[in-house]
Image (spheres, rainbow, N blue to C red):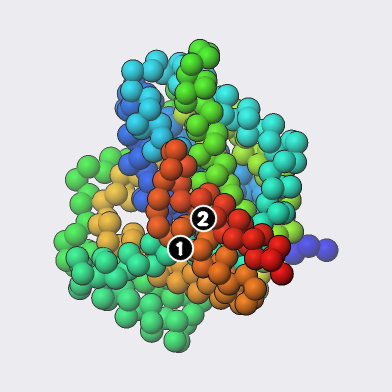
Amino acid sequence: MKSSPLTDASFSTISAGFVAVLVGVASSAAIVFEAARAAGANEAMIASWIGALGLGMGLTCIAFSWYYRAPVITAWSTPGAALLATSLSGIPLGEAIGAFLFSALLTLLVGLSGAFERVTRMVPTPIANAMLAGILLQFGLSVFTSLQAQPLLVGTMLLTYLAGRRWAPRYAIILVLAVGVAACWKLEMIVLEQVRWQTAHPVWVTPEFRLSTLVGIGLPLFIVTMTSQNLPGAATLAASGYGRVPLSPVISGTGLTSLLLTPFGGFAFNLAAITAAICTGPEAHPNPDKRYTAGIAAGVFYLIVGLCGASVVALFNAFPQALIATLAGLALIGVIGSSLAGATAETDSREAGMITFLISASGISLFGIGAAFWGLLGGLLCYWFFKRRN
């Protein structure tokens, strides 16, 4: 008989879910705002976008994590939002919604066909680990770049992390958050003037379809989301020992969720990578079988974000960026270390792993596709080249 999430949950899994949502929303909400404004959305529509995105992520995180007993974290497509912010100017909002629906339909079809799962099975574990380490490296480095800008705040958080890892490892990150917030308050670095509490109300936009917009916006949104979000998300699950989670139903579920919520602003849902890594590591819970409750906790917090809409985002943005960057970097140190270890453990695949890691960490973007995809491609070519030689 399966245990209940209420009995499996712990303070560390709940805090991991909270930190994942905090990092995910605070680090990329501004990009979603810019995408909505580029599409011609007014303030009520922007709140509807945040509401739809929070609802979609909350429901999918809870449903997938509960059903598969694994921390399956979903997210909005941050690269997709960045693409939209630069591509939607001059395009009617109805046509933009139509493009989102087209992208969601393609995602659903890929999930139903099983093609995505077949592709991810072709990725060796060292390459998946290396790609994940490369994606997360900048977050680890941000701790020390932030230290230069805010030495007192970041230094205090760093010392708290070291002490927490030494004497209370399961609670280290939540202690870092508490100390960081207290330090920000003491240093008068929290800006609350623009925070106004209000709930989000759904705003329906009737989709319109034009071939040029479907091809020019919908297709690139689909490609960017699959390559820059879903592939790294799948690598995160595999590298953390959750390769048993069937990916096709998850991809289908995110596509269906997008179809249902797109008219209200839910432009794209996908597997998370960075925020997922916060919930899949040993810091969330020493027992991998109980980390799924971190995914459920993240879903609950995402529902709160959706309910309160832009007000919660404004609250997150009231804190300095150094706090968010340091919190994310410290939460991911363990995952970066274990991913690097997995990427270089096998001598025969070490070169391929390092090439994957370096390209993924470089941040390059070619043809609108991010470094994670090119790192994966370069690593696979190198891996197969050396395998054929042997």
> Which residue type does callout 2 highlight?
Gly
- What is the x, y in percent for residue 175? 39, 73
Kindly indicate whether the residue at mark 2 contacts the one at mark 1 (C-beta within 8 angstroms).
yes
Which residue is more in the foreground, 192 or 54? 54
Q: Seen from this angle, which residue lies furthest front?
A: 389
| Image quadrant where residue 44 sits | top left
| Residue under label 2 | 375
Which residue is more in the foreground, 59 or 139? 139
Q: Report whether residue 272 is seen.
A: no
Q: Seen from this angle, which residue lies furthest bottom?
A: 167
- What is the x, y in percent for residue 114? 75, 41
Q: Seen from this angle, which residue lies furthest left?
A: 188
Along the polypeptide, which appears first: circle 1 or circle 2? 1
- What is the x, y in percent for residue 379? 57, 59
Q: Residues within 10 Å of mark 2 (few under 14, many from 20)?
A: many
Q: Is residue 211 above or below residue 151?
A: above
Q: CA distance from mark 1 to mark 2?
A: 7 Å
Q: Is residue 70 above or below residue 29?
A: below
> Which residue type does callout 1 highlight?
Leu
Label annotation for residue 165: none
| Residue under label 1 | 358
Name the residue rendered at 57%, 65% in the picture: 352
Name the residue rendered at 47%, 42% in the picture: 369
Give the position of the C terminus as an image quadrant.
bottom right
State how many labels appear: 2
Which residue is more in the foreground, 306 or 198? 306
Q: Residues within 10 Å of mark 1 (few under 14, many from 20)?
A: some
